Amino acid sequence: MSKESVTLTNNSNGQSVEMPLMSGSLGPKVMDIRALYSQMDLFTYDPGYTSTGACKSKITFIDGDKGVLLHRGYPIEDLAEHSDFLETAYLIWNGELPSPAEKKKFESDIIGHSMVHEQINFFFRGFRRDAHPMAVLCGVVGAMAAFYHDTLDINDAHQRMIAAHRLIAKMPTIVAWAYKYSQGQPFMYPKNALSYAENFLHMMFATPCEEYKVNPVLARAMDRILILHADHEQNASTSTVRLSGSSGANPFACIAAGIATLWGPAHGGANEAVLAMLQQIGSKDRIPEYIKRAKDKNDTFRLMGFGHRVYKNYDPRAKIMQRTCNEVLDELGMRNDPLLQLAMELERIALSDDYFVEKKLYPNVDFYSGIIFKAIGIPTSMFTSLFALARTVGWIAQWNEMIQDPDQKIGRPRQLYIGAQQRPYVPLHKRG
């Protein structure tokens, strides 16, 4: 029985070639075009790679039309409801949920790596106090390769695992220290008795002068936020990590490249943009004006936090985040905060407006995460850093999967050249 294929015909010369079709466990079939250039002297043009599969992966599956997000086959709703971040991290890295003994060992391994090399403490001091936290993260994470020489052999599976543990464990410390440094406050060291989310909140908000007790509702909310942002298939930052890794670069350099990509406002800065938009609107009585502007194609104003590049239905993470948002606001007694009131009213109007409903412009995960962060007391400049903290798990798992893929090659996209054709060099004295 012959395999499925698609026949491509070049109308200019009548040449035809068969391209085999590949089937994944879920999702549409994929046309294998690896032989296209060698057989037809053609290659594809696909800006943004929106129709191009650059790799095979077992980690995350998204069906944007149905609003489905699976990690290793498990729905994000189940993981957010019943799991915790480190268990989800184990799943994403290893492919299966851990046994009780495996979970205990994994948590111990991560906790055992949560401190950073003491010299990194002094490395922070080379930055200006007003440096953007993402700039600090890029520098510090990239510099980890200078501190942890024993995990740079990417062909050694054990070294890759230790590098993964170090990155997952140390990222909360690095992110919290970036915040502390910007505030002129002393660094708080990790506490092994605390959970992953509790430890992060403690390092963020505790000071040496008094005891800080982590609110369990806020810790659970933070843990859920980390789960919801842990991985999201082949987005810009993940693709950057894979592309960097395809050259054989060390894992710390690859994750630093992912952080740099995430820093872009079109990718990781969306929840910052939500807060900026709410501040621009200013009050609830101005919402109709801005709703009208959002519908006007000639107006540059856009409702941030609504709709999604991938999800053409409701973002499955947004429903979980909405519930989490309500839990946090109730716990902190912040229902009457003017900006949060504005956000809730904007959400209500948008969900009932025919224009947004027809276009399926539902609130996404960024809309609610920005509100939660503000309520907890995390400054807007730190929002993308928290995204990086969560996404490190996905990045390092995707990198590890790529290293082991026998089809993996160094990334080398092609181009459609539209510049000048070959021409002779004109000496300087002959140019007019």
Image (spheres, rainbow, N blue to C red):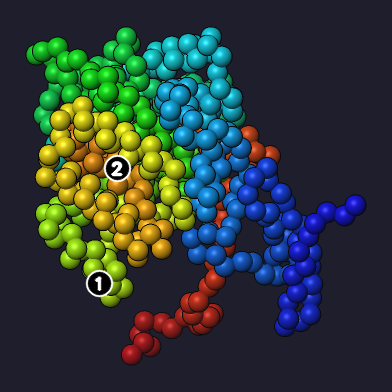
Q: Is residue 209 visible?
A: yes
Q: Is residue 232 left or right of residue 1?
A: left
Q: CA distance from mark 2 to mark 1?
A: 25 Å
Q: Is residue 142 visible?
A: no
Q: Quadrant of the C terminus?
A: bottom left
Q: Secondary structure at mark 2?
A: helix
Residue indicated by mark 2: 368
**Residue type of the residue flagged with mark 2:** Tyr
Q: Say few, some or many: other residues with alpha carbon within 10 Å of mark 1 (under 14 / 14 to 19 / 20 or more).
A: few
Question: Residue at left 21%, top 33%?
Answer: 329
* Percent coordinates x, y for residue 57 in the rendering: 60, 41
The residue positioned 11% from the left and 54% from the top of the image is 283
Q: Secondary structure at mark 1?
A: loop
Which is more toward the observer, 260 or 273?
273
Of circles 2 and 1, the one toward us is 2
Residue closest to the far right: 1
Question: The disc labelled 1 sits on which kind of residue?
Answer: Asp
Closer to the chain start, of discs 2 and 1, is: 1
Specify the label residue 299 is tagged with. 1
Q: Residue at x 16, y 37 (%)?
A: 335
